[in-house]
Image (cartoon, grey):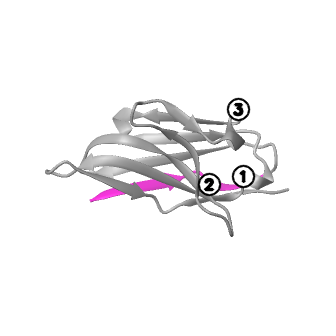
């Protein structure tokens, strides 16, 4: 079984920073893609930042220049450094990964449980 565990959310004032982490564990053979999505109340889940299958990064326009995604391949972990946070960044942030796992090397998509980020004064 595969698990994605997020950490690092919380309450921060506008203009502040937070760093989210997501660690994938289990019988993982390889990670194809991994990144972050978010969902605000009453809105659809949206992409924030991801590493694509080709290894490049992809950011939502709303976070470009403020958020940075990075990874530690040895730890199957991705990070999201969020700077200059705005109230509109308030949402539950979810980690997502497309990976191959198990003895049959099956490809599957997994979501973490989510971590709340609240930007408010």
Q: Which tag, 3 or 2, sits closer to the chain's start?
A: 2
Q: Main secondary structure of the magenta part?
A: strand
Q: Position of residue 19 (x, y in %)?
A: 61, 43
Magenta-drawn stretch contains 18: no
Secondary structure at numbered mark 1? helix
The quadrant of the image that shows the C terminus is bottom right
Numbered tag placed on residue 65 in the rendering: 3
Residue 2 location (% of width, % of height):
31, 56
Q: Quadrant of residue 10?
A: bottom right
- Which residue does the image show at 62% across and 54% down from the upper left? 9
15 shown above or below 102: above
Q: CA distance from mark 1 to mark 3?
A: 14 Å
- Give the number of the mark in front: 3 or 2: 3
Q: Categorize mark 2 by other alpha carbons within 10 Å: few (<14), some (14-19), many (20+).
A: some
Examine the rendered structure and indicate whether residue 116 appears above or below residue 34: below
Q: Residue at x 45, y 52 (%)?
A: 96
Q: Of callouts 2 and 1, which one flags the residue occurring earlier in the amino acid sequence?
A: 2
Side of 87 where 55 appears, left or right: left
Residues tagged 1 and 3 counted as in contact (Cβ below 8 A): no
Which residue is denoted by mark 1 in the rendering?
Answer: 89
- In depth, the one of 16 and 63 nearer the eye is 63
In the rendered structure, the answer to whether residue 52 lies left or right of residue 20 reads left
């Amino acid at each position: 079984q595969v698990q994605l565990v997020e950490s690092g959310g919380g309450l921060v004032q506008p203009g502040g920073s937070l760093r989210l982490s997501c660690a994938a564990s289990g019988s993982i053979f390889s990670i194809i893609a991994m990144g972050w999505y978010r969902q605000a109340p009453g809105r659809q889940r949206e992409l924030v930042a991801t590493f694509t299958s080709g290894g490049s990064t992809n950011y939502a326009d709303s976070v470009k220049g403020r958020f940075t995604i990075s990874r530690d391949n040895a730890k199957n972990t991705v990070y999201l450094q969020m700077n200059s946070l705005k109230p509109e960044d308030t949402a539950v942030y979810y980690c997502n990964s497309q990976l191959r796992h198990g003895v049959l090397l099956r490809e599957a998509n997994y979501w973490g449980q989510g971590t709340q980020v609240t930007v408010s004064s």
